[in-house]
Amino acid sequence: MKKEGCPYCNYGEPLAKFGFLAFETETSEVIVFKDQTHPGRMVVAYKKDHVAEIQDLSDEERNAFMKDVSDVAKAIQKAFHPDRINYGAYGDTLGHLHFHLCPKYKDGFEWGGTFQMNTGNLAEDFTVKEVAKKILDAYEA
């Protein structure tokens, strides 16, 4: 069941404040996070229902979702060549299952520490669309 007001359940303005839908899989929405302080940062959100916790998914649903997370990570690696990818699954305030995939670069911003959720440094629409295209071109399911 979708939840009213949830940006991952309802496209449009709530999502557009922080993300841009790059593409969808059967299980997930793949979103460019507009804060591109870490070039190539993405969000993979579960799309079938408003699910808060990974343990609320069946084994089959969880495996499909985590495959999407892995496939997007591979696309980030191929398109942006980070030294590491950090993963964050936060939901204290939003409560919708999603993972932040945050590429990290040696000697770059926040290397060796936890990535900030929002730095307030939002990329222009052109840049966000470029990131979406790079990820989609590198994506192999």
Image (tube, helix red, strand yellow):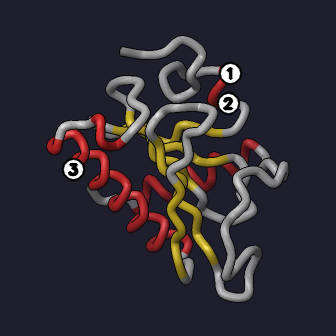
Q: Helix, strand or loop at disc 1?
A: helix
In percent of width and height, residue 24 lies at 39, 37
Q: Amino acid at mark 1?
A: Glu
First in sequence, mark 3 or 1: give its number: 1
Q: Helix, strand or loop at disc 2?
A: helix
Q: Residues within 10 Å of mark 2 (few under 14, many from 20)?
A: few
**Hey, which residue is sitting farthest left in the picture?**
60
Q: Is residue 85 above or below residue 95?
A: below
Marks 1 and 2 sit apart, C-alpha to C-alpha, by: 5 Å
The residue lying at 58 percent from left, 26 percent from top is 7
Q: Quadrant of the N terminus?
A: top left
The residue that label 2 is drawn on is: 16
Marks 3 and 1 sit apart, C-alpha to C-alpha, by: 30 Å
Q: Is residue 58 above or below residue 117?
A: above
Q: Residue 63 shows which numbered tag?
A: 3
Decide which of 2, 24 is in the foreground and name it: 2
Q: Helix, strand or loop at disc 3?
A: helix
Q: Amino acid at mark 3?
A: Asn
In percent of width and height, residue 96 lies at 48, 32
Q: Amino acid at mark 2?
A: Ala
**Hey, which residue is sitting farthest top in the picture?**
4
- Foreground label between 3 and 2: 3
Marks 3 and 2 sit apart, C-alpha to C-alpha, by: 28 Å
Label 1–label 2 contact, CB within 8 A? yes
Q: Is residue 81 above or below residue 138?
A: below
Q: Residues within 10 Å of mark 3 (few under 14, many from 20)?
A: few
Q: Residue 13 shows which numbered tag?
A: 1
The residue lying at 81 percent from left, 54 percent from top is 119
In percent of width and height, residue 67 lies at 27, 55
Decide which of 2, 137 is in the foreground and name it: 2
In percent of width and height, residue 59 lies at 16, 44
